[in-house]
């Protein structure tokens, strides 16, 4: 993967929004990789959990907005509880999703969901809360 | 009638997880407690909102807590029991969140002008915590009529009973509360290393394949460590690990089906209450009847 330092993250409006929505100081990550090593979804991700912080620190929010990873995160909080500096990556993933959802973007179309009859209500409620505005 | 305790069932227990609701109420009844449904409860929202600049995901939970506050005064008990992991996690997080951030609570109280303000004295408990700390596992042991001797069970906590830290019902990396209960019921508990790993959660709606893969991994390891059945408390974990075995089987030839049960079903069985009106085995895709027939 190509890494480019795009711009000063302090001046990037989108990154400031991620910081504000998530309430996390993204600059305190020092790339220990513990989040990625414990992540049960990492094998299905294109950008690894620790790389999310790296891209944010390098001012590259576009890669994250185009990545699958924020939509693959299952909010299981394994990374959150294991982070040595106490960063809540699940909240950062949510903030990246929110940047798009708040523009009225539907990641999941409720009408196209298969086996709707069988799914437990909590499955649909949680899915639509994470993936629709 | 036993002692009245407030019970928050949650939406899933009213439908696909009827087996969880009825076996919970039945096991509590045998222990001398009457789980009374919280009047007028609403959906918990299933996932807690992580955006710091929004309180919308907290409203429903605080409203439920206010309802519990009113009803709790009526029955003279401030404990609110949830058995669904998602409901427990949401109610507990909301309680902790508004207690730590009083300005958030103030905003919500102003918004919900039809209700009384939340005083913050509701004790949200998961049924397992209630059994361990309030009822006492020794009391549970007294009620065991048919010990589940020889039944090899993998205890599965999933995420929401253990994470984040402030809502954990036990040590988040090496919990034992469920093992302890299952041992008291007479079951042989296997050492299951993936007991606190995620099942894939809400991806079951739009990315079933991921959940199929997780199911394959979780159940194959459970099989390897010698389990006959896997016990959980979360209706979403239950659905994923039960129903998504179809996908796991289609993709992996070496996959062997494993029945999934709620720990409350095992409790009811050990207490000698084996009617289908309590256990509802028709709600399972992979029937546990074969594995459990010795005790039924």
Image (cartoon, rainbow, N blue to C red):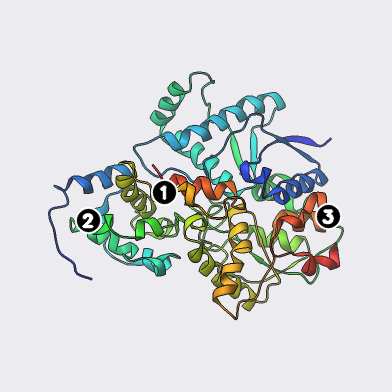
Quick check: marks 3 and 2 in contact, CB under 8 Å? no
Upstream in the sequence, badge 2 or badge 1? 2
Q: Is residue B114 rendered to the left or right of residue B25?
A: left
Give the crowd class for mark 2: few <14, some 14-19, many >=20 residues within 10 Å.
few
What chain does badge 1 belong to? A
Could you give the CA–CA distance between mark 3 and mark 2, rounded to whole angstroms? 58 Å
* Residue with the mark numbered 2: A62
Residue at figure coordinates x 64%, y 62% from the top left: B242
Q: Position of residue B160 (x, y in %)?
A: 53, 52
Residue found at the very far top of the displayed protein = B114
B218 relative position to A74: left or right: right
- Image quadrant in which you'd find residue A68: bottom left
Residue assigned mark 1: A131
10 Å crowding of disc 1: few (<14), some (14-19), many (20+): many
Q: Quadrant of residue B5?
A: top right
For marks 3 and 1, give the one nearer the viewer: 1
Q: Which residue is mark 3?
A: B271
Read off the chain for label 3.
B
Work out whether residue B291 or residue A23 is closer to the camera in this orientation and state it: B291
How far across and down, in percent of the image, does residue B282 sit? 75, 56
Callout 1 secondary element: helix
Q: CA distance from mark 2 to mark 1?
A: 19 Å
Placement of A87 over or under B49, stated as above or below: below
To which chain does the residue with label 2 belong? A
- Marks 3 and 1 belong to one chain: no
Q: Residue A94, percent across and down?
A: 36, 49
């Amino acid at each position: 993967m190509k890494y480019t330092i795009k711009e000063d993250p302090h001046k990037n409006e989108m990154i400031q929004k991620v910081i504000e929505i998530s309430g996390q100081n993204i600059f305190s990550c020092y790339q220990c990789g513990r989040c990625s090593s414990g992540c049960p979804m990492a094998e299905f991700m294109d950008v690894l959990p620790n790389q999310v912080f790296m891209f944010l620190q390098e001012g590259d929010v576009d890669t994250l907005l185009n990545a699958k990873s924020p939509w693959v995160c299952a909010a299981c909080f394994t990374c959150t509880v294991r982070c040595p500096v106490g960063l809540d990556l699940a909240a950062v993933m949510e903030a990246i999703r929110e940047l798009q959802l708040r523009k009225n973007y539907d990641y999941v179309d409720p009408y196209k969901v298969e086996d709707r009859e069988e799914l437990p209500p909590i499955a649909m409620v949680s899915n639509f809360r994470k993936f629709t505005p | 009638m036993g002692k009245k305790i407030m019970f928050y069932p949650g939406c899933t227990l009213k439908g696909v997880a009827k087996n969880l609701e009825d076996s919970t109420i039945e096991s509590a009844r045998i222990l001398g407690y009457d789980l009374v449904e919280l009047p007028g409860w609403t959906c918990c929202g299933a996932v807690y909102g992580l955006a710091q600049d929004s309180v919308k995901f907290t409203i429903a939970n605080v409203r439920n807590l206010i309802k519990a506050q009113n009803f709790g005064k009526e029955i003279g008990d401030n404990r609110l029991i949830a058995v669904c992991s998602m409901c427990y996690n949401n109610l507990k997080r909301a309680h902790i969140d508004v207690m730590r951030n009083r300005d958030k609570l103030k905003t919500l109280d102003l918004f919900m002008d039809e209700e009384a303000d939340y005083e913050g004295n509701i004790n949200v408990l998961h049924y397992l915590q209630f059994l361990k700390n309030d009822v006492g596992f020794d009391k549970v042991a007294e009620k065991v009529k048919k010990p589940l001797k020889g039944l090899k069970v993998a205890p599965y906590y999933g995420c929401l009973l253990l994470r984040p830290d402030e809502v954990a019902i036990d040590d988040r990396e090496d919990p034992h509360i469920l093992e302890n209960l299952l041992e008291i019921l007479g079951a042989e508990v296997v050492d299951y290393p993936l007991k606190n790993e995620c099942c894939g959660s809400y991806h079951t709606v739009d990315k079933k394949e991921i959940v199929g893969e997780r199911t394959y991994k979780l159940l194959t390891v459970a099989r390897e460590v010698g389990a006959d059945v896997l016990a959980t408390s979360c209706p979403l974990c239950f659905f994923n690990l039960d129903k998504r075995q179809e996908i796991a089987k289609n993709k992996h030839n070496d996959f062997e089906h494993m029945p999934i049960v709620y720990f409350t079903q095992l409790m009811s069985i050990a207490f000698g209450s084996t009617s289908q009106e309590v256990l509802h085995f028709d709600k399972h895709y992979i029937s546990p009847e074969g594995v459990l027939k010795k005790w039924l």
